[in-house]
Image (spheres, rainbow, N blue to C red):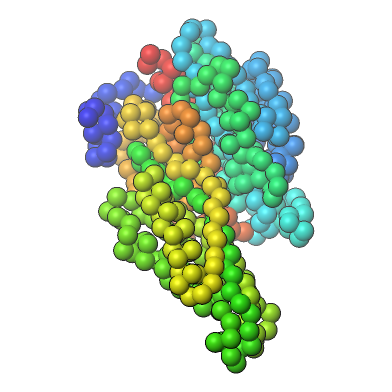
Amino acid sequence: MKKLHLLALLGLSTSAFAQSPDKELMAAAESIEDQVIQWRHEIHQNPELSNREFETAAKIAAHLNSLGIEVQTEVAKTGVVGILKGDHPGKVVALRADIDALPVTERNDLPFKSKNTANFLGSETGVMHACGHDTHVAILMGTAEILSKRKDKIHGTVKFVFQPAEEGPPPGEEGGAALMIKEGVLKNPDVDAIFGLHINSATPVGQINYKPGGTMAAVERFVVKVKGKQTHGSQPWGGVDPIYISAKIIDGYQSIISRESNLLVEPAVITVGKITSGVRFNIIPEEAELIGTVRTLDPDMKKLIIRRMTEMTEGLAKTYGGSATIEFQNNTAITYNDEELTAQMLPTLQNVAGAENVNLVKATTGGEDFSFFQEKVPGFYFFLGGMTPGNTTPYPHHTPDFMIDDDGLLLGVKTMSQLTLDYLNAQ
C-alpha cells in the first residue's frame, strides 16, 4: 500500500508530501470572492429545473466565452463544457458542477430569495436551489476565471463541465451525467481524472470532508407488482390477497439487510416508500404495487441484494398463491473515490484548508450521479462546509429552509483551482 494512501485511510496529515498553496493563486481567489458570491446570488434568485436550465446555461457560456475559453453548449440538452488548454502538454482533468434546482418553494427572507415558479408533474410549485448547486456553479465559474489567466502554469488541459439534471431528468427524458457521457463529454480530449465537490449545510464553513472508496450510495429505484385474486373482504379464502403478500415481501426484504448483508463491509438500505392497492374497505383487490429504493456502497453487496430481492419477490408471492415481478431502475452508481487519486490529492486539501480542517468521514446513503463519471475515469469527490460556524440547527438539503453561508464559497474556489494545478503539474 502506498504511504499516502495509508495516511489518507488513517486520516493523518500528509501535508509534508506536498508543496504549499500557490500564494498568487490564493490571492486571485480572494480578489474575486465578491464576484463569485454575486454570481451565486443571481443564480439562486433565478433557479431552473432539470433539463430546463436555459438561462443558467447562457450565463455560464457567456462567462466562459469572455475568458477566451473554448465553449460547447447544449451538451446533454442544457449542459455547458469549457475547454482550457494550458501552454504546456500534459494530462486532461475535468472539473464538474451541477446546475439544476429543485421543485421546492423557498421559505426564508434572503434578499436573493428565489422568484421562480414552474409546473412540475402537473402541479405548480416554487423552484429553489435547495441543494446548493448554485454555489457549485459560482465556484466553478470562479475557478475558470482564475485558471484562464494562468495558462502558462498549466501542463495539460482543463475541462469545465457544467452538468444539468443531477436531480434527475423529467419522466420520459434522458439527462444528467449519463447523457453527458453518452454524448462524449469525457472524450476529445480524453479525460484522465475528474474532480467534483458538494456544499454541505451541516458542515461548518472552512471544513472539508472526504472519504476514499465508496463515499455515496448507488441508488436503485424498484417497482414491485403483485398479482392476486379479487374477492369479498368477508371471504378471504375465496381469493388471493395481494396486500397480505406485499406485507410478507416488505418484511422479507428487511431480512436481506439484517441477516444476509455483511454490514461490517458497508451499510445498505432497502426502503419501500409507496404502496398502492384497493378501492374499498370490504374488497380484497386483485393487485398491489410497491415502489421503493435500495442504497448500497459496495458492488458485491449491491449484486447480492438485487438478486435476493428478485428471488424473494417471486418466491414469496408464489408461496402465498399469487405472483409478483420486480423491476429496478439504476438512478446512480456508487460515488467511488479512486483510492490512489484521493491519496494524491489529499495533501492539496490539507494545505489549502489546513490539515486540522480536513476530515475523514464515513459514507452517506445519499446518491450522486457524479458516480457515472467515476465509472469511466478516476474521480475524487469531496464535501465543502457551508454552515455558519456555531449554528446548531442547520436545515437539511432539499427543504424549503435550506441555507448556505456565502463565506464557504472562497475555500471552494481555492481548493478546485489548486487541485487542478497540483494534479496537472505533478506529471
Compared to residue 259, the image places residue 301 above or below, namely above
Extreme residue in the bottom direction: 234
Taking the spot 46% from the left edge, 15% from the top edge, the residue there is 91
Q: Nearer the viewer, residue 228 or 211?
A: 228
Which x, y percent locates residue 11?
27, 40
Front-lying residue, 300 or 414: 300
Could you say which is closer to the camera, residue 43 or residue 261? 261
The quadrant of the rendering that contains the C terminus is: top left
Q: Tell me the quarter of the picture where residue 41 sits.
A: top right
Residue at figure coordinates x 50%, y 22% from the top left: 191
Location of the N terminus (image quadrant): top left
Q: Residue at x 61, y 39 (%)?
A: 176
Does residue 30 show up?
no
Residue found at x 71% / y 29%: 74
Instruction: Note whether 174 is above or below 321 in the view shown.
Output: above
Number of callouts in the render?
0
Q: In this orientation, does residue 218 appear?
A: yes
In percent of width and height, residue 51 lies at 70, 41
Q: Quadrant of residue 169?
A: top right
Q: Is residue 29 left or right of residue 352?
A: right
Using residue 297 as the reference point, say whether residue 29 is left or right of it: right
353 to the left or right of 179: left
| Viewer-side residue, 386 vs 328 | 328
Q: Position of residue 15 (x, y in %)?
A: 28, 28
Looking at the image, residue 3 lies above or below residue 332: above
Locate residue 59, reporting x and y percent: 71, 31
